[in-house]
Image (tube, rainbow, N blue to C red):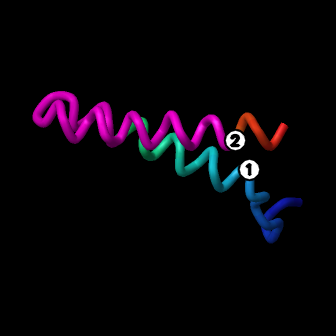
Amino acid sequence: MGWFSRKSEKEKLQDQYKKLVDEAYKLSHSDRKASDLKTAEADALIKRIEAMD
């Protein structure tokens, strides 16, 4: 049923990517520099995810 299935490494990275993008969006309203740093982290992470394919 999937209740006890473990997430793959790719799924974990995708979740982390989504979290970083959300944080970057929230920070974009108040702290542009911090938002840019979060966006850069997310970009590096998405490249890692794409390399897994």
Image side of residue 14 versus residue 17, left or right? right
- The quarter of the rendered structure image containing the C terminus is top right
Q: Residue furthest right?
A: 1
The vertical placement of 44 against 6, above or below, is above
Q: Main structural element of the magenta stretch: helix, strand or loop?
A: helix
Residues tagged 1 and 2 counted as in contact (Cβ below 8 A):
yes
49 or 30: which is nearer to us?
A: 49
Asked whether 30 falls inside the magenta stretch, the response is: yes
Quarter of the image for residue 22 reads: top left
Image side of residue 20 versus residue 8, left or right? left
5 or 10: which is nearer to us?
A: 10
Residue tagged 1 = 10
Residue tagged 2 = 49
Mark 1: secondary structure: helix
Mark 2: secondary structure: helix
Is label 1 or label 2 in front?
Answer: 2
What is the x, y in percent for residue 40?
Answer: 41, 36
Label for residue 20?
none
Image side of residue 10 versus residue 33, left or right? right
Tell me how far mark 1 sits from mark 2, CA to CA.
Answer: 6 Å
Give me the residue at 58% from left, 48% from top: 15
Give me the residue at 70% from left, 41% from top: 49
Asked whether 15 falls inside the magenta stretch, the response is: no
- Near mark 2 (Cα within 10 A), the count class, few <14, some 14-19 or many ≥20, is some
**Which residues are drawn in magenta?**
23-48
Give me the residue at 80% from left, 71% from top: 4
Give me the residue at 84% from left, 60% from top: 2
